[in-house]
Amino acid sequence: MPRQMLTMLGLLGFSLMAASTAPARAETCDDLWYARNEIYKAQGYCFRTARGISAFGNAGCQYDAVEDVPLSSSQRRTIADIAREERARRCPR
């Protein structure tokens, strides 16, 4: 394969990888709320609010306290970024 073609394929692969790891820009406060809580759900959080239970359910949940949910440093950063955006937009809590 020509060198130029390999370089283009490499750049395309890098672009796709970078795009898949970057969170999509949320359009609304509801989008932000859902994105933040989707992370907690994936890690086993047991929701307490009617909204959380309605959106995600509690099947298979393991952690009653948010502080107990095992999150990676990347997940913690994402949640902090989302919470910062929610505050900036004055989203209801």
Image (tube, rainbow, N blue to C red):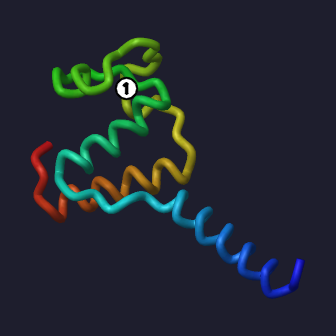
Looking at the picture, tell me which residue is in the foreground, 89 or 14.
Answer: 14
- Against 30, residue 28 (above or below) is below
Label 1: element kind: loop
Residue furthest top in the image:
59
Residue drawn at (31%, 18%), measured in percent from left and top?
57
Question: Is 5 positioned to the left or the right of 86 in the image?
Answer: right
What residue is rendered at 52% in x and 64% in y?
A: 19
Q: Quadrant of the N terminus?
A: bottom right
Position of the C terminus, as image quadrant, is top left
Foreground of the two, 32 or 70: 32
Q: Which residue is mark 1?
A: 65
| Image spot of residue 17 (x, y percent) | 62, 62
Seen from this angle, which residue lies furthest right?
Answer: 1
Give the amino acid at mark 1.
Ala
Q: Residue 70: where, in percent of width, then height?
A: 53, 34
Q: Quadrant of residue 10?
A: bottom right
Quarter location, residue 78:
bottom left
Mark 1, other Cα within 10 Å: few <14 / some 14–19 / many ≥20: few
Point out residue 67 in the picture as x, y percentages from the top left corner.
41, 34
Task: Give the tally of numbered discs.
Answer: 1
Left or right: 71 in relation to 3:
left
In the visual, does 5 lie left or right of 14? right
Left or right, residue 7 beside residue 68: right
* Residue drawn at (30%, 23%) of the image: 47
Which residue is situated farthest in the bottom direction here? 4
Classify 1 as above or below 69.
below
Q: Position of residue 86 (x, y in %)?
A: 21, 56
Give the vertical position of 48 relative to 70 (above or below).
above
